[in-house]
Image (cartoon, helix red, strand yellow):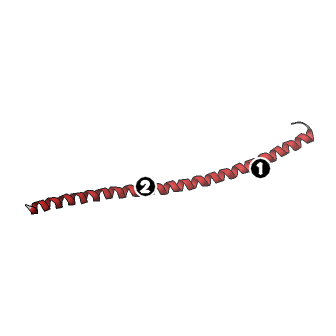
């Protein structure tokens, strides 16, 4: 009787262990996907920062060009007194 009881307890624990192994496999897959997506997300963030830097440089260039254009218009106005 005790042998049957011990075998039953043993089987129960083996089933739990097998269940944990299956869960572990699923968790590993999910973790790998998460890490992959995190790396992709990091790359996208870095690319976005680079694009923002380029955009800022272009805006600065346009601001300087606008100021030059405004200076030319003012010079032209004072020379001709007409727009």
- Mark 2 vs mark 1: which is more N-terminal? 2
Q: Is residue 43 left or right of residue 13?
A: right
Quadrant assignment, res 1: bottom left
Q: Is residue 40 left or right of residue 29?
A: right
Q: Which residue is mark 2?
A: 34
Q: In the rendered picture of this protein, how many numbered marks are placed on residues?
A: 2
Q: Nearer the viewer, mark 2 or mark 1?
A: 2
Crowding at mark 1 (Cα within 10 Å: few <14, some 14-19, many 20+): few
- Which residue, as the protein is rendered here, is positioned at the far left? 1
Q: Would you place residue 55 above or below residue 10 in this image?
A: above
Q: Nearer the viewer, residue 4 or 67?
A: 4
Residue at (67% x, 51% y) in the render: 56
Crowding at mark 2 (Cα within 10 Å: few <14, some 14-19, many 20+): few
Q: Secondary structure at mark 2?
A: helix
| Residue 7 in the image, given as x and y percentages of width and height | 13, 61
Q: Nearer the viewer, residue 79 or 10?
A: 10
| Residue 43 in the image, given as x and y percentages of width and height | 53, 56
- Which residue, as the protein is rendered here, is positioned at the far front? 2
Q: Would you place residue 6 above or below residue 76 in this image?
A: below
Q: Is residue 18 left or right of residue 50?
A: left
- Which residue, as the protein is rendered here, is positioned at the far top? 82
Q: Which residue is mark 1?
A: 64
Residue at (46% x, 54% y) in the render: 37
| Residue 49 in the image, given as x and y percentages of width and height | 60, 54
Q: Would you place residue 13 above or below residue 64 in this image?
A: below
Q: CA distance from mark 2 to mark 1?
A: 45 Å
Residue at (65% x, 53% y) in the render: 54
Disc 2 vs disc 1: Cβ atoms closer than 8 Å?
Answer: no
The quadrant of the image that shows the C terminus is top right
Checking the image for residue 48, the label placed there is: none
């Amino acid at each position: 009787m005790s042998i049957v009881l011990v075998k039953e307890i043993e089987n129960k624990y083996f089933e739990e262990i097998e269940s944990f192994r299956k869960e572990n496999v699923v968790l590993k897959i999910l973790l790998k996907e998460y890490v992959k997506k995190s790396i992709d997300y990091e790359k996208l963030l870095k690319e976005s920062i680079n694009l923002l830097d380029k955009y800022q440089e272009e805006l600065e260039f346009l601001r300087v060009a606008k100021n030059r254009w405004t200076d030319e218009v003012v010079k032209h106005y004072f020379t001709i007194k007409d727009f």
